[in-house]
Amino acid sequence: MIEVSELTKRYGGKTAVDHLSFTVRPGQVTGFLGPNGAGKTTTLRMILGLDAPTTGAATVSGVPFRHHPRGLRHVGALLDAGQVHGGRSAAAHLAALARSNGIPRRRVDEVLQEVGLAEAATRRIGGFSLGMKQRLGIATALLGDPPVLMFDEPINGMDPEGVLWVRRLFRRLAAEGRTVFLSSHLMSEMENTADQLVVIGRGRLIAAESVRDFAARGTRGCVVVATPRAAELAAVLTAAGGSVEPEGPAGTERLVVTGLPADRIGALAFENRIQLHELTTRTASLEAAFMELTADSAEYLAGQPR
Ligand SMILES: Nc1ncnc2c1ncn2[C@@H]1O[C@H](COP(=O)(O)OP(=O)(O)OP(=O)(O)O)[C@@H](O)[C@H]1O
C-alpha cells in the first residue's frame, strides 16, 4: 500500500505537486496518469524519498520509504532506465545491488530470466537498446521480490511484443497480491493494463477511481443501430425520448442513438416489427474522458506556454 497525504513540492515559485492525496492498494494495477509536466515523476521521487516534500507526506506499507531498511526488499522501482552504469554487464549491475541489499545472488539469474535478458546477462549495458534498458530496470525492481512496485513510464521504448509482455507481467504481479503503480502520459497504455487510475494535472488530483468509473465520466456512450427502415425507426426512437443522428453518408441505414439503452432500442424495434441488422453499444472512450478532464491542466497546449 502506498499512501500520499497532502503532498506538495515547490521549486522556487513553481508548484510541481500541489496538496496531492491518494492511496494505491495491493492486488491491483494502478495507473498514474497526467499530461507532460503534471508532476508524476516528482511524486514518485518523493514517495521513494529521493526528493523531500515541501509539505505533506508519503508512506509505503505505513512507513516513510527512507525508514525501510534494505529498501529493495520493500519497494522495487524503475524511475529512469537510462541511469545505469553503461560499462558494467547486466549481471554485474544486479549482483552489486543484490549484495548491498542483502538479497541472495540466485535472484540475479531469476530476474534476468524473468525479463528475457538471460542471453544478454554478460553484455555491457552501454550497448543495450532503450527497450532492453527498460527490461533491466524492471529486473532491478523485481530483484528484492518486494510487495510494492513503482514504474515511471515503463512502456517507453518497448516494441509491441515487449508491451504485451510487460502488461502480462504487471497483471501477474498484482494477482500475486502486490501493489503495482505505473505512470504514463498516455491513456491508451493504461486502458488494457490498469484496474484503478490516479489522474493528475498541474500537480493536483483530478480523479482517483476505477478505470470503468473514469471512462463513464467522459462523453456519454451511444448505441449504433442498422436497419433497412431507418426513417421509421428514427421516428419511433425519437418518440421514446432518444436522440437520433444518421451515421455516414445520406442513404445509409445506420443510426447513432443517445439517451436510450440498447435493450430498449431492441424492444422498440421488435414491437414495431422493424428488422435490425446491427445493435451495438459504444462505450465512452477512456481516451476521450482523459482528454476532457485534463484539457485545462496540460502545461503546454499546441506549443503555447500557459
Ligand atoms: N528539479 C526541478 N527543478 C525545477 N522544476 C522542476 C524540477 N523537477 C520538476 N520540475 C517541474 O515540475 C513540474 C512537474 O514535473 P514532473 O517531471 O514531475 O512531471 P511529469 O508528470 O513526470 O511529466 P512527464 O510526463 O513529462 O515526465 C514540471 O513543470 C517540471 O518542469
Image (spheres, rainbow, N blue to C red):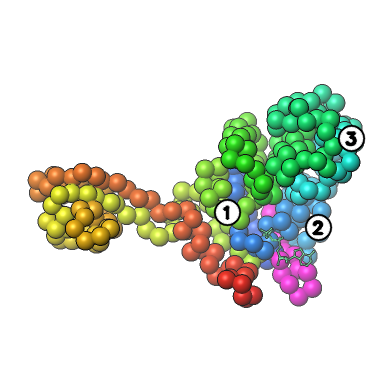
Q: Residue at x 21, y 55 (%)?
A: 252
Q: Which residue is mark 2?
A: 51
Q: Is residue 78 above or below residue 8?
A: above
266 to the left or right of 210: left
Residue 121 appears in view: yes
| Residue farthest along the front direction in this orientation | 127
Q: Label 3: how many residues lie within 10 Å, few (<14), some (14-19) or many (20+)?
A: few
Compare marks 2 and 3 and give the one earlier in the sequence.
2
* Quadrant holding the C terminus: bottom right
Q: Which residues are magenta?
A: 2-16
Based on the displayed image, in which of its 4 quarters is residue 294 positioned? Answer: bottom right
Q: Residue at x 72, y 45 (%)?
A: 130
The reply to whether dot 2 and dot 3 touch (C-beta < 8 Å) is no
SS assignment for the magenta stretch, majority: strand
Q: Please tell me whether mark 1 or mark 2 is closer to you in this view.
A: 1
Q: Is residue 209 magenta?
A: no
Q: Is residue 12 magenta?
A: yes
Residue 171 appears in view: no
Assign a secondary structure to mark 1: loop
Q: Tag on residue 96?
A: 3
Does label 2 point to a residue whose CB lies under 8 Å from ligand 1?
yes
Amino acid type of the residue that numbered disc 2 sits on in the rendered structure: Asp
Amino acid type of the residue that numbered disc 3 sits on in the rendered structure: Ala
State the image coordinates of residue 211 (x, y, percent, origin top left): 50, 49
Q: Label 1: how many residues lie within 10 Å, few (<14), some (14-19) or many (20+)?
A: some
Assign a secondary structure to mark 3: helix
139 to the left or right of 20: right
* Quadrant holding the N terminus: top right
**Quarter of the render that holds ligand 1:** bottom right
Q: Which residue is mark 1?
A: 186
Residue toward you, 61 or 211: 211
Compare marks 1 and 3 and give the one earlier in the sequence.
3
